Image (cartoon, rainbow, N blue to C red):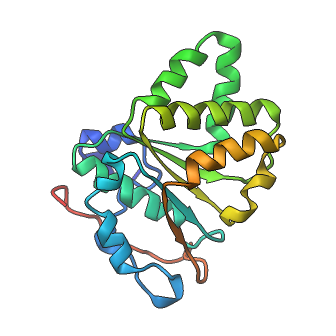
Amino acid sequence: MPDRWLKQPRSIQAAKLREPGASLSNIDFDPLRKIKKSSVSNLSNCEWVRSGSNLIITGATGVGKTYLLSAFGRAACMKGITVRCYRVPRLLTSLSIAKGDGSYDKLMLDLVKPDLLILDDFGLKQLDLAMTQDFLEVVEKRHHAERSIAISAQLPVKEWPSVFKDQTVADAILDRLVRNAYRFDLKGPSRRSTIEHQPPADNE
């Protein structure tokens, strides 16, 4: 981890953002990316989190989904909002293991506590019935607690039903995730070989 990230505020460290140095102020608004500056600006105050709305970011590999998720996560942390970030494949594996070692309920409580739960890399593979049920449990509990989810996926939202084995459960998940969500569908070439940002100031 770069030295500058070791100096991040404790709230950002606790969030475990995949790109903790990401910043909304350094987003590249190249027209090819289809990111409206006004849309980012309107969400930068994080009132969408306080109201329990969701955020969906889709786009091909390398277009900057994780960076944008992390930038919103950082902005939320700086406003005193509690945040926690997980990769979906790793989270579902952890939930499966937790069922066996008796820590499932504790992990589920940990997933409900943060004001904003960031779920990165959704839909990389089809979820079996057990994983589908676990994912529903996470989404359902946060929905009833009126707490926000920010999620990224390579697949466009219209193809998300294909990720789940059980389509009845899929409908329930998507209704809770998509209905009250702000959405970004990123375009353009991969940015994996580019530097999007400079380290933001801690008082951003």
Quick check: 142 left or right of 178?
left
Residue at 66 percent of width and 62 percent of height: 157
Quarter of the image for residue 100 reads top right
Nearer to me, 5 or 23? 23
Q: Where is residue 59 in the image (x, y as percent from the top left)?
A: 62, 70
Q: Answer yes or no: is residue 198 visible.
A: no
Furthest toward the top, the residue is 102
Quarter of the image for residue 9 reads top left
Q: Where is residue 105 in the image (x, y as percent from the top left)?
A: 56, 16
Q: In this view, does 197 lie above or below 86?
A: below
Q: Is residue 151 above or below residue 39?
A: above
Residue at 28 percent of width and 43 percent of height: 81
Nearer to me, 117 or 142? 142
Residue at 51 percent of width and 82 percent of height: 34
Q: Answer yes or no: is residue 72 visible.
A: yes
Quick check: 24 left or right of 63?
left
Residue at 35 percent of width and 37 percent of height: 14
Q: Where is residue 28 in the image (x, y as percent from the top left)?
A: 40, 80
The image quadrant where one finds the C terminus is bottom left
Furthest toward the left, the residue is 203
Quick check: 23 left or right of 160?
left
The mark tally for this picture is 0
Q: Is residue 107 above or below residue 168?
A: above
Q: Where is residue 128 in the image (x, y as percent from the top left)?
A: 82, 37
